[in-house]
Amino acid sequence: MPGPVRPALRVQSLAAIDEVAAPHWNALVGDDYPFLRHEFLAALEASGAVSTATGWTPRHLCLWQGEQLVGALPLYHKSHSRGEYVFDWGWADAWERAGGRYYPKALSAIPFTPAPGPRLLLASHIDPVEARRQLATQWEGSALSGWHLLFAESAEVDAWLEARPELIVRHGVQFQWQDAGFGDFNGFLAALTSKRRKAIRRERRRVAEQGLQLERLEGEAIDEVALSHFYRCYCLTYLERGQRPYLPLEFFRRLRATMPEALLLVRARLEGHPVAAALSLQGARTLYGRYWGSEVMADSLHFEACYYQGIEHCLAKGLSTFDPGTQGEHKLTRGFAPLRLRSLHHIADPRLRDAVVRFCTEEARHLSAYCTDAEAALPFRT
């Protein structure tokens, strides 16, 4: 006999993440991607980092079936392209010089967070194609210039293309470390070529020779003093480039208050005083390196705090993947392999769409060759 008839799907647009209860939203979130948790998105909004004033107007989408939340998609209306890390400034400039209007645009991504992971959260019984078709009505045919899906998992990109094959694919690359059964850091080093093994040992030795001592703090051990010092260091990273930091201290305080178990702070001390810090978030299987800063110029300290301490933490805690953040070919020689990424783009105007398709096609050819060369340059013994 056929099962019970389920209520029709209904799309709701939220002006703030707090318009949906945290337990309902988090029931759809897995255990390995902390950036989609209600607490993380709420911290961005409550701290003022994400708002209409900063160019990120929340328009999160919820998919309801009766009284049950069965789908959720982070969505923002953007008045600029800052804080995204998939750069479309050239598209915007060319279109506006041609008399078009590129902003506002719709964006499904985690603000200021170029970490690959899930985007659309769906209950297991929901038809993924039908869900995506309904959600797409929120930007298709609107006054928005388009919709952009950034840093989504490969399977999700495939699912969107099945539902919306006209979406434009743009290729990208990051670098990730994977545990191949190394056991400990020495086991990881043993898998590298002699040249790279010696180089990493030399970098770690150089950090110690400068009198620097590293420590890792998790969860409740990250007190207000440690967090405030980290924030000073984080701000320096931006100020040294003449920029303002995207995130206020209140954002990090809210993370510590609402999801402390997801936080890992690596801190460097010199003569007993903290001088540098790196803050990461962690899921059930993955460590995500996110924020870094230093009050001192010290040889190899960045590599130690942001890479080697993270690898040690993964090996100690049984985490299989370390995503150290975007960009940086220097990760390649330290055992971080290239990870091919795809973003998706709906462009409303066919004239701009045609130009973007040509750009992405040409860019993909160059990127494919780059990734092939990068994979061949990995420092592991064969």
Image (tube, rainbow, N blue to C red):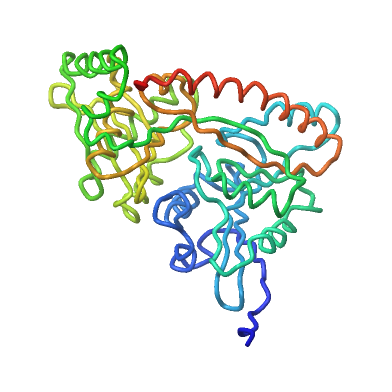
Residue 224 horizontal/vertical position (percent): 25, 44
Towards the viewer: 291 or 232: 291
Towards the viewer: 30 or 194: 194
Q: Which residue lies furthest to the bottom in this view?
A: 1
Please state if 108 lies on the left or on the right of 23 as rendered: right
Residue drawn at x 22%, y 40% as measured from the top left: 316
Quadrant for residue 330, please give it: top left
Quadrant for residue 8, please give it: bottom right
- In this picture, is 303 found above or below 321? above
Residue drawn at x 17%, y 18% as measured from the top left: 208
Please state if 90 lies on the left or on the right of 310 as rendered: right
Residue drawn at x 52%, y 50% as measured from the top left: 118
Please state if 22 lies on the left or on the right of 93 as rendered: left
Residue 380 horizontal/vertical position (percent): 36, 22
Q: Residue furthest left?
A: 272
Towards the viewer: 276 or 172: 172
- In this picture, is 344 found above or below 335? below
Residue 199 horizontal/vertical position (percent): 28, 13
Residue drawn at x 75%, y 58% as measured from the top left: 137
Instruction: Indicate the quadrant containing the C terminus: top left, top right, bottom left or bottom right.
Output: top left
Number of numbered tags placed on the structure image: 0
Towards the viewer: 35 or 166: 166
Instruction: Indicate the quadrant containing the N terminus: top left, top right, bottom left or bottom right.
Output: bottom right
Residue 29 horizontal/vertical position (percent): 46, 59
